[in-house]
Image: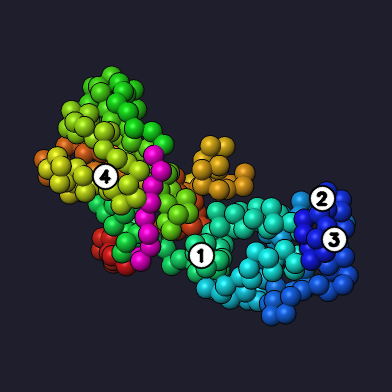
Amino acid sequence: MAVGTGRYITGQDEASAAGNAIDAGAMPPGDDHLGTAAGISRADPRPLHRQVHGAIIEAIETGRLPRNGKLPSERELVDLFGVSRITIRHAMRDLVQQGFLQSQPGKGFYVAVPQRGFELHLLKSFTATALANGRSPGQRLIEARIYRAPLEITRPLFLPEGAEVVVLSRLRLLDDVPVVIQTDWMSAARAPGLIDLDWSSPNRSLYAEIRERYRIRPVRGQTTLSARLASQDESERLGLVPPAAVLTVDQIAFDARNRAVNLTTLVHHPERYPLTLAQSESGDIEQI
């Protein structure tokens, strides 16, 4: 690790350098908003990247790093904390995945602005909701196939057990940050060729496709909200540290002829994609 001397140090030497940075008060000019190598100690049993992670979170929570504020450059952070570039990159990656920071290519890292929440609307797609909130939607395909589904899937779709069903599972992104795992099921007979579409396209919407390509129009539905502990796979995909809770949303949509259109399960990162739900005095859902 280069710390201004051209000497590379690892392991215990790196921890010692971090401790020396505290003792010497090493900090580039203009970085006093982070404190003097705050939280970094050779006596601390935590890995160095976790100490850097904690120090930056503390600076955000105390206001020393303001919302939308730009962090020092990687080189400055290396000098400030007295650790390697790999350690800084590890900490930055975790902070982005957890929603504390946003990365802007070519510009650096900025403190994320807390979300006011995303409106829960069964008939409005993730893509449309993201765009309406001024965010950039994206997705990574997890699974797309046709299979003979068990009764727990076919029953809410009003299909016989063993009927062929399309399953489409995607990791949904906001500004390149994973926020939701979404899995949809629908009758394969109603949507031929659906799995052959390019689901890596960031703005491809399932509801837009079924409306425009198959002339299927969802008009009403039912939603059930719950919470549980995330599985190991869900934690890894959403960047959660186990044990962690997730918000789950189960939905089923119907067309004007009361036929089931699709069954959806969403697993939400509770901090990166909070939901809002407003109701009128009569109990009807209102748009926020």
Front: mark 1 or 4: 1
Kind of element beneath mark 3: helix
Span highlighted in magenta in the image: 133-141
Q: Residue 73, can we see it? A: yes
Q: CA distance from mark 1 to mark 4?
A: 32 Å
What residue sits 51% from the left and 47% below the top? 238
Dot 4 corresponds to which residue? 206
- Relative to residue 82, is residue 275 drawn left or right? left
In primary-sequence order, the first of circles 3 and 1 is 3
**What is the three-letter code of the residue carrying label 1?**
Gly
**What is the three-letter code of the residue carrying label 3?**
Ala
In primary-sequence order, the first of circles 1 and 4 is 1
At which x and y percent is residue 174?
A: 42, 56
Q: CA distance from mark 3 to mark 1?
A: 29 Å
Decide whether residue 135 is among the magenta residues. Answer: yes
Between 81 and 137, the residue placed more toward the observer is: 81
The local crowd at label 1, few if under 14, some if 14 to 19, many if 20 or more residues have their Cα within 10 Å, is few
